[in-house]
């Protein structure tokens, strides 16, 4: 029978990788709390319409990347490709934004059927924040500072912030018309993807990777020229506040984002250290999504970062994260392990990590296992120790003599030695 392997693009996280994941997740939690954000957990599966209507049915995610299936109740369901839509759904459903504002964060697996490569997977993890109810540029600045703090706390350098503003629906509609007019005059030079987008989502042509398209776009109308005064002011005020906080940024007028719900500020934190997948974190304003989903008119802004990309960067740049230490390894060679079990549980009560040897084995073999476990101390109870009412404490990492300690003093002695 052939071995069944994991699904392409969906990775196992093995024990030697989880230590760094724990550390990064702990930093993300702590930073969220420092800024007063609260955690929200939504289901991994949602009704398909939530994503098609929120993300947009002409986007790459909805057109070709969703894991969608019909369940036994004939309902079309989808594994979440992102969490903004679910967060908004939950906030409306539970009245979390009824006459109030809320700062939220989330972390968990997302699913997109993309072509897997370094930094791009079919099951990946995102950490994200969403701030619902604030219209001004101050909250845009706040979430960008959250990103900056995360890089700092993880010791990651060289991430560049690109920002842009997409303006309101009204200015975008006027711009879309002008851009479509310009591109229609140049259809001969457009590639297949751009031709298709010309009538569905012409703004996406702006972030085409094709150099020929980028050359044409040099003469294209610019969105900023269609923006209303208050939209310009919002953006300028954000830029000023970033400068005041000492955050460097690059304005990229071609930054449009691949999800339809954005309006106003959009941004991406990018790096050149992860091969083709340059975006570590991305987000922006989605002031109309909540009304479009049936909620009360509520401005909102957020971002999400890919944990696989973040962790790869953290591992490339900061010191190695040690796995959770094993403090003691219990070896009992007698017929009854009651005494050692009791000691092990007491040590755990004191906060120590203890492995008890399970199964048979000669002392030499058991000591080998103790050594492999990384434990600092082996606690040995053989026949002689049992008869004298002691436990032998053997140092596995330091060149110190072993000692025989009375059973009732072992816990205290271990705590003194190990903590
Ligand atoms: P997004 O740009 O689609 O935005 O994804 C955000 C981040 O998730 C990316 O910058 C990248 O780091 C990571 N990511 C996306 N796809 C993959 C993949 N296949 N493999 C590994 N990492 C990936 C959103 O998802 C929006 N919901 C962000 C947002 C929140 N906007 C407002 N609030």
Image (spheres, rainbow, N blue to C red):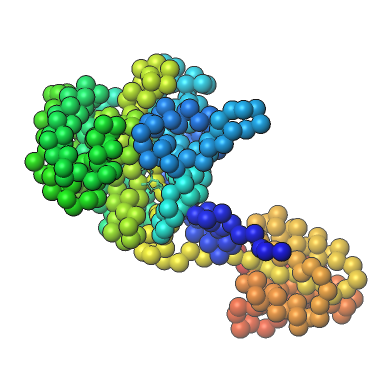
Regarding ligand 1, which quadrant of the image does it lie in? top left
Taking 271 as reference, is 18 left or right?
right
Q: Position of residue 93 (x, y in %)?
A: 51, 21
Q: Is residue 272 above or below residue 67?
A: below
Residue in the image at 25% along x and 41% along y: 194
Front-lying residue, 45 or 353: 45
Residue in the image at 48% along x and 64% along y: 321
Which quadrant of the figure contains the N terminus? bottom right
Taking 326 as reference, is 227 left or right?
left
Q: Position of residue 217 (x, y in %)?
A: 14, 43
Residue in the image at 50% along x and 31% along y: 48
Q: Position of residue 131 (x, y in %)?
A: 38, 31
| Residue 419 is at least partly visible in this image | yes
Q: Is residue 31 above or below residue 343?
A: above
Quadrant location of residue 303?
A: top left
Front-lying residue, 253 or 405: 253
Q: Is residue 54 above or below residue 363?
A: above
Quadrant location of residue 165?
A: top left
Quadrant location of residue 55?
A: top left
Residue most extreme to the left? 219
Residue in the image at 11% along x and 30% along y: 225
Taking 103 as reference, is 4 left or right?
right
């Amino acid at each position: 029978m052939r071995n069944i392997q994991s699904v392409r693009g969906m990775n196992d996280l093995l024990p030697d990788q989880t230590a760094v994941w724990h550390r990064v997740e702990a930093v993300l939690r702590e930073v969220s709390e420092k800024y007063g954000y609260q955690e929200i957990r939504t289901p991994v599966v949602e009704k398909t319409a939530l994503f098609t209507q929120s993300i947009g049915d002409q986007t790459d995610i909805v057109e070709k990347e969703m894991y969608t299936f019909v369940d036994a109740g004939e309902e079309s369901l989808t594994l979440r490709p992102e969490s903004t839509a679910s967060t908004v759904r939950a906030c409306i459903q539970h009245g979390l934004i009824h006459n109030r504002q809320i700062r939220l964060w989330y972390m968990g697996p997302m699913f997109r059927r993309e072509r897997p490569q370094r930094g791009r997977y079919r099951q990946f993890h995102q950490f994200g924040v969403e701030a619902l109810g604030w219209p001004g540029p101050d909250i845009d600045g706040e979430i960008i500072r959250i990103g900056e703090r995360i890089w700092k706390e993880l010791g990651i350098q060289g991430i560049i912030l690109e920002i842009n503003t997409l303006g309101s629906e009204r200015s975008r509609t006027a711009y879309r018309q002008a851009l479509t007019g310009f591109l229609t005059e140049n259809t001969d030079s457009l590639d297949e993807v751009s031709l298709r987008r010309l009538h569905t989502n012409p703004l996406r042509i702006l972030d085409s990777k094709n150099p020929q398209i980028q050359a044409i776009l040099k003469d294209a109308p610019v969105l900023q020229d269609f923006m209303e005064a208050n939209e310009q002011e919002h953006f300028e005020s954000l830029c000023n506040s970033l400068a005041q906080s000492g955050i460097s940024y690059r304005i990229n007028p071609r930054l449009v984002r691949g999800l339809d719900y954005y309006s106003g500020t959009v941004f991406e934190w990018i790096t050149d250290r992860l091969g083709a997948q340059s975006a570590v974190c991305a987000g922006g304003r989605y002031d109309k999504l909540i009304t479009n989903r049936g909620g009360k008119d509520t401005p909102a802004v957020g971002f999400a970062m890919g944990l696989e990309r973040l962790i790869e960067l953290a591992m490339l740049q900061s010191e190695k994260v040690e796995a959770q230490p094993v403090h003691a390894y219990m070896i009992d060679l007698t017929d009854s392990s009651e005494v050692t079990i009791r000691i092990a549980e007491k040590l755990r009560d004191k906060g120590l990590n203890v492995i008890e040897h399970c199964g048979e084995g000669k002392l030499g073999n058991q000591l080998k296992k103790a050594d492999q476990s990384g434990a600092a101390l082996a606690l040995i109870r053989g026949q002689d120790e049992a008869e004298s009412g002691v436990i032998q404490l053997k140092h596995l990492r330091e060149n110190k003599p072993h000692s025989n300690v009375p059973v009732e003093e072992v816990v205290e002695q271990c705590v003194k030695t190990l903590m």
